[in-house]
Image: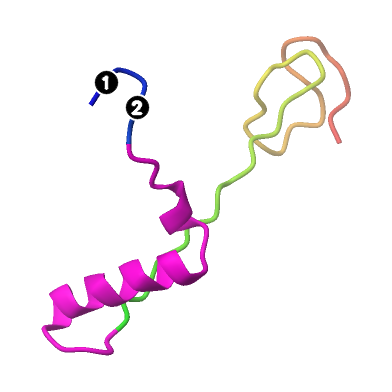
Amino acid sequence: MTEGSGFDLRRFQLGGEEHDKIRSIAGKIVSGREGYKIVEEKKKVKKIKKCKCGWVLGGGEKFCPECGEKCS
């Protein structure tokens, strides 16, 4: 392979036919039988609150400790 070329795996993550193929292949490897599909764990990403000045807020603050701006 040359530099910059690679195998793009995003099409397997987005869902659809390719995603189902990967799930069935992984299920067969795990269970040893046809038709078994693995259950995927989807993690929720916690949104980080920031002030207008860019300071990361821990949670529960009414005012930004860096600039003093009121947080909503």
From what the image shows, is residue 53 above or below residue 9?
Answer: above
Question: How far separated are the C-alphas under marks 2 and 1?
Answer: 6 Å
Expressed as whole percent of the image width and height from the top left, the position of residue 12 reads 42, 57
From the viewer's perspective, tell me whether residue 63 is left or right of residue 1: right
Which amino acid type is marked by label 1? Thr
Q: Which mark is residue 40?
A: none
Which residue corresponds to the image point at 27% horizontal and 86% vertical from the top-left? 36
Q: Is residue 31 magenta?
A: yes
Which residue corresponds to the image point at 35% horizontal and 27% vertical from the top-left? 5
Residue of label 1:
2
Which residue corresponds to the image point at 88% horizontal and 25% vertical from the top-left? 70
Which residue corresponds to the image point at 42% horizontal and 66% vertical from the top-left? 19
Residue of label 2:
5
Q: What is the quadrant of the C terminus in the image?
A: top right
Q: Which residue of the protein is positioned furthest toward the left in this rendering?
A: 32
- Residue density around tag 2, few if under 14, some if 14–19, many if 20 or more, within 10 Å: few
Q: Are marks 2 and 1 in contact (CB under 8 Å)?
A: yes
Q: Secondary structure at mark 1?
A: loop
Q: Secondary structure at mark 2?
A: loop
From what the image shows, is residue 60 above or below residue 63?
Answer: below
Which amino acid type is marked by label 2? Ser
Expressed as whole percent of the image width and height from the top left, the position of residue 16 reads 52, 69
Magenta region:
7-36
Quadrant of res 32: bottom left
